[in-house]
Image: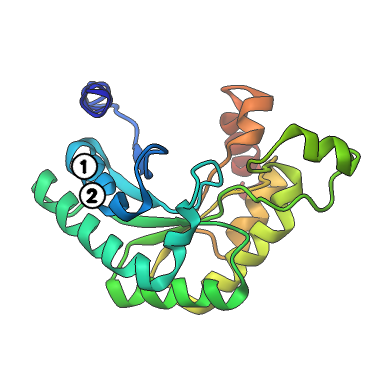
Amino acid sequence: PRLEAARVRLQRRYGANRPIVGVNIGKTKNVDLRRATADYLASARELAPAADYLVVNVSSPNTPGLRLLQNVASLEPLLTAVRKAADHAAGRHVPLLVKIAPDLTDSDIDDVAELALKLGLDGIVATNTTITRSGLRTDAEAVIALGVGGVSGAPLKARSMEVLKRLRTAVGEDLAIVSVGGVEDADDVEARLAAGATLVQGYTAFLYEGPFWAARINRSLAKRLR
């Protein structure tokens, strides 16, 4: 019922001035990791017809065990199955991207890039939040007391940029890279685009700055281009 409700709401946006909407799908917390593929496929079949592009999220730190799916041996059959299900359900090719964590090793990032090229994916979203706690101003004990979860925003900025540059070197110009993580202002966006990002997203700054955050950045970038 929740998937159907989401699809209905997404389909309401269709019209002359509809925005481009990507749909991010991930494994449900109460689904065992052994049944993860079936869970992704259920989401893909229901939501792909209403999506302009689909993102397979295997990097949320808030779903126990999910990041284990970033292993190429697990990731290849998952992405292959999701792509087939999504395109069949939508009756068209639905651009497919995979969203990865910043905490992958450099060699793992290279493996994901190689797999994305091998499978002919449309792109990679880099990156999700980090489970590391380095570079924070808050006392370490206080941070630990807050519990587990992903850290986003400024502490993620440097690593997110590193992953972007590494991916662009690995995939050349063959894939779209959506850079996200620690993007706060027009300078950050300009830097990401210069480093090879196809698109730039934001989440933490959007929450702090409000709904017109992106518009302010776009106006600033437009002035610089002029």
Q: Which mark is residue 38?
A: 2
Residue 41 in picture, x, y percent from top left: 22, 48
Q: Amino acid at mark 1?
A: Ala
Q: List x then y, in percent, for residue 57.
A: 42, 50
Q: Is residue 174 visible?
A: no
Q: Residue 15, image x and y in percent?
A: 21, 25
Query: What secondary structure is marked by label 2?
Result: helix
Instruction: Judge the density around disc 1: few (<14), some (14-19), many (≥20) Cα neighbours within 10 Å.
Output: some
Residue 1 appears left or right of 152: left
Please identify the quarter of the rendering in which residue 169 is found: bottom right
For label 2, the crowd category at 10 Å Cα-Cα, with few meaning under 14, some 14 to 19 and many 20 or more, is some
Give amino acid for label 2.
Ala
Which quadrant would the N terminus be assigned to in this image?
A: top left
Q: Are marks 2 and 1 in contact (CB under 8 Å)?
A: yes
- 145 sits to left or right of 131: right
Q: Residue at x 32, y 51 (%)?
A: 36
Let me know if residue 102 appears in the view.
yes
Q: Position of residue 49 (x, y in %)?
A: 17, 39
Q: Is residue 160 above or below residue 108?
A: above
Residue 96, numbered circle: none
Residue indicated by mark 1: 42
Judging from the image, what secondary structure is the residue with disc 1 in?
A: helix
* 190 and 204: which is toward the camera: 204
Decide which of 85, 192 is in the foreground and name it. Answer: 85
Q: Quadrant of residue 143?
A: top right
CA gap, disc 2 to disc 1? Answer: 6 Å
- Looking at the rendered image, the disc whose residue lies closer to the viewer, 2 or 1, is 2
Number of callouts: 2
